[in-house]
Image: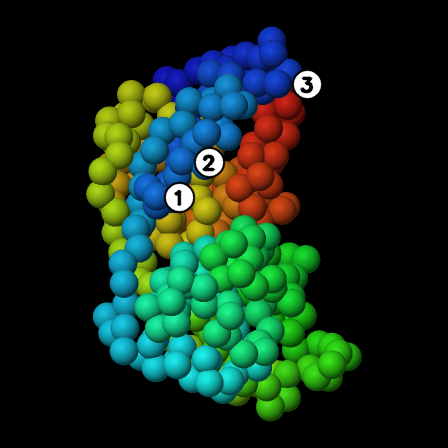
Amino acid sequence: MSADRTPLSEQNPPSADPSRPLQGWRVVVTRSEDRADGLADQLRTLGAEPIVYPTIMFAPPEDWGLVDAALQRLLAGAYDWLVLTSVTAVQAVQERLAMLTGPAPAAAIPRLRIATVGPATAAACTEALGLSPALVPEKFVAEALAEALTAPDRAPHQGLQGQRILLANADLARPKLEEMLRAGGALVERVVVYRTVPARGGVDLPALLAQGQVDVITFTSGSTVRYFVDRIGPAALSAAHQVLIACIGPITAEAAQAVGLTPTIVARSFTEAGLLEALVEYVHTLER
């Protein structure tokens, strides 16, 4: 905390309303604009003032032809598993499948198992594709999904040896999942179904940081961290070191640490709900 700023514990006294524990807290939301509303609404419900500053947005892949060819093979029964790691990936696959099959792709998809990272992606899969995932790991990171899929006692296939997997994800996705699946004996084909690119718009965050008008900056992925640094500039980044950093999980926290933003709050459950729970828990520690 900078020397001329009031400590957060004094600046934001305990809320008189237990249902609004974040009363008076100003919390930056860095995720894409089309995904910011849910987190912003939950922050308002908890009494916080959300500050929307999108750092990323999503764009189509450079070549839809590669995606469409892979989805044609999927419809022909060429894969045993479809692995989806984000809501955006689910939406991209659904949109392209709808172009190939019509508005109800589930009816055209042959017997196929789907694995997803996290409950939000699983819910999106059920809603958009009409198919319930066969596997959602307990921890919502790529490593946990790979470990669950490659477990040697996993019925009915005794692991992934020889299993054909279509991995649909982003251009900036970490390679760890693909590497672990291949190491487990799977035959993996990866296709980029969307690109993560820099965002524009939102509030004048550098000015708010300079005025001491920000309490917390939240990050929900490594890409939000990296593009935050690129967008905000060195002067404002220096000011960002003076506020709390909250991350949705350890992978995002590592990305923040790598650029010099030390996380104070790291969610134990790697979801928006887990991030908010961790933030509320931190606020309660200031009340003791």
Discs 3/2, front:
2
Closer to the camera in the image, 240 or 41: 41
Q: Is residue 88 above or below residue 51?
A: below
Closer to the camera in the image, 210 or 171: 171
Give left or right: position of 64 versus 132.
left
Callout 2: helix, strand or loop? helix
Closer to the camera in the image, 239 or 198: 198
The amino acid pointed to by label 3 is Arg
The residue at 31%/79% (across/down) is 66
Real-space Cα separation, disc 3 to disc 2, in angstroms: 27 Å
Residue 39 marker: 2
Query: What residue did someone put label 3 on?
Result: 288
Q: Earlier in the sequence, mark 3 or mark 2?
A: 2
State which quadrant residue 163 falls in.
bottom right
Q: Is residue 80 above or below residue 64?
A: below
Query: What residue did someone put label 1 on?
Result: 35
Closer to the camera in the image, 205 or 202: 202
Give left or right: position of 224 versus 153.
left
Q: Is residue 199 above or below residue 188?
A: above
Q: Is residue 15 above or below residue 114?
A: above
The amino acid pointed to by label 2 is Leu
Q: Quadrant of the C terminus?
A: top right
Give left or right: position of 258 versus 45.
left
Residue 116, position as x, y percentages in the image: 56, 63
Residue 103, position as x, y percentages in the image: 40, 62
The amino acid pointed to by label 1 is Arg
Residue 285, position as x, y percentages in the image: 64, 25
Q: Earlier in the sequence, mark 3 or mark 1?
A: 1
Q: Is residue 143 visible?
A: no
Disc 2 vs disc 1: Cβ atoms closer than 8 Å?
yes
Give left or right: position of 99 versus 122.
left
